[in-house]
Image (cartoon, rainbow, N blue to C red):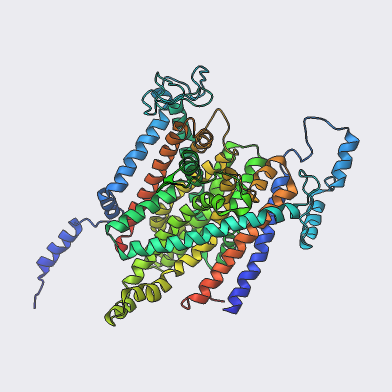
Amino acid sequence: MNFILPRDQAEMMERALDFKGRSLWTDARRRLLKNRAAMASIVILAVIALMAVFAPNLSPYAFDYQDYSIISCAPDWWPDRTAPCIAGGAHWFGTDNLGRDLFVRVLYGARVSLAVGLIATLVSLVVGVAYGAIAGFIGGRLDELMMRFVDVLYSLPYIFLVIILMVVFHRNFFLLFIAIGAVEWLTMARIVRGQTLSIKYKEYIEAARAAGVTRAATIVRHVIPNVLGPVVVYVTLTVPAVILAESFISFLGLGIQDPLTSWGVLISDGSKQIETAPWLLIFPATFMGVTLFCFNFIGDGLRDALDPKDR
Amino acid sequence: MLSYAIRRTLLAVPTLFVIITAAFFMMRIAPGGPFDSQRHLPPEIERNIESAYDLDKPLYEQYLMYVDRLAHGDLGPSFKTRDFTVTQLIADGLPVSLRLGLTAMIAAVLAGILLGTVAALNQNGVVDYLTMSAAMVGITIPTFVTAPILTLIFGVYGVRFFGYDISLPVGGWNNGAVANMILPVTVLALPQIAVIARLLRGSMVEVLHSNYIRTARAKGLPSYVIVLRHALQSAVLPLISYLGPAVAGLLTGSLIVENIFGIPGIGRYFVDGALNRDYTLVLGVVICYAAFVILFNLAADILYAVLDPRVRYAR
């Protein structure tokens, strides 16, 4: 048998105090940093976001400047020499059917699309987390009532309601954010409620209750921080869903209005001229595709990082 | 089980009711009406038109009248397409939309199950990575990008295959001729195929690692029997609960697809109707779509409960 002498015990205690525990988040960060696809996606997204922010500084042309002498012209490096005309100059992506520079418009489209993605996701995050945590933590009749409400909203063909909203309120830009966000919170609420139920009877929650912490404070301090894992993953999947929803609405001609633009509008315009000016579709579609890819890869990477059991 | 089914069905009724109410009032708080035009009519005529369509009554009364007529299966007259009732317009377009949607659905389920199974059997192999990358592309590229690209390739440039011209018509419906359906169905099915393949791969991988599959292998059953009879049966379960929402996805997708390919379904009514303030037509289409979404969600939930005895619905 191996006796532990009191002195050794003290030493062990000291060593244990020195030892820093690795929290879930440190662990997850380490795993995420090792995930090449996710890291590359983060870098690419950062580049696109920076380009969107500094769009006016990157091109000599304003996003609504029209040059009628170069309408629907190919960029000068375009391989297909049968293109009707060459834009030349700093029109790296060519020009659209009103003689505007496509490069700067794609970046302005990125501004709108990313802004919609982030703001609508933020709306859905705040509403969904609060709703789900309250329903799950309080439980009982309130939970039943709140989740039935979500069930009812869930079976609404929401995109139709968003479209009606957009038509009704004259394509109000701000409302578009809210409308899309107000729809996306449902899944978030369900996820958070499920997670809350699973930790509701954990010892630390009971300890908080025993210590006399109020319910509101328990939810804010103890429940929400501990359900964030799946929420973070879902957020990265909501952003591309929102960007898609916005472009879908814009494609139908109900989204943002000229001269402002979004990727959906650019793709919609481009697909009308696909035979004569394919670059008008290719560039915005590529930017949007790459962005959606990146968000999906980050989402997958985060899921693997936070929940390594199914690898 | 039966009580669960009844409870779910009962929940569908208020859901539909909420949709009708929300859509009705949302259309109405909008400024502008169906008979606004550049040309100003004399006020008496305007009043006559409005009273002909009961638009002069208070809003709540109009709502009650609408619900009352709806209960009798009457969706009212279209405000803009004169001489047609909404019921007639929907009866014209719905079969087309349904045929398109269901064909795409069946194609998506078959192709998705096939791809997902193949990927799962080849877990972490080359085929797996290729299939899953393709699925990722399918999920991220929206229909309104795939549609013009496929149109360009198969319709405009034309494709020759062993000397045969297999170009496809890029628009129109032609009474549902097969050639006219290929492109729209493909465009509509692609994202669904991708999602279904991913879902099925996930559940299949899990099932293939379970004990009863190992038992089946130990018994020496041929592997196609194991996959088809034993594994697939429980692996498709998560798919069933996806099918409800998938229908909603197909419907919204068909809005775009009908728009691009010029297909005379009910999708085009929706956008045009909303822009023209054709209240009754928009409401009719929304109710129609909502009914389908609810019906499929309901069917999926009940089917799931029937097929998976592990699911016990309390109360």
The one of A104 and A120 positioned closer to us in this rendering: A104
Residue A211 makes an appearance in the image: no
The one of A265 and B11 positioned closer to us in this rendering: A265
Q: Is residue B289 above or below residue A105?
A: below
Q: Is residue B209 left or right of residue A113?
A: left
Residue A88 makes an appearance in the image: yes
Q: Residue at x 79, y 39 (%)?
A: B35
Q: Is residue A24 left or right of residue B186?
A: left
Give the residue furthest to the top. A69
Q: How far across and how far down the image is residue A185, in percent?
A: 52, 53
Q: How far across and how far down the image is residue B32, in percent?
A: 74, 38
Q: How far across and how far down the image is residue B227, in percent?
A: 36, 72
Q: Is residue A85 above or below residue B282?
A: above
Q: Quadrant of residue B209?
A: bottom left
Q: Is residue B16 left or right of residue A207?
A: right
The one of B157 and A274 positioned closer to us in this rendering: B157
Give the residue furthest to the right. B44
Q: Is residue B92 above or below residue B38?
A: below
Q: How far across and how far down the image is residue A271, in percent?
A: 51, 37
Q: Quadrant of residue A206?
A: bottom left
Q: Residue at x 44, y 32 (%)?
A: A279
Give the residue furthest to the bottom. B219
The mark tally for this picture is 0
- The quarter of the image holding the C terminus of chain A is bottom left
Q: Residue at x 82, y 53 (%)?
A: B61
The one of B245 and A204 positioned closer to us in this rendering: B245
- The quarter of the image holding the N terminus of chain A is bottom left
Q: Residue at x 40, y 23 (%)?
A: A57
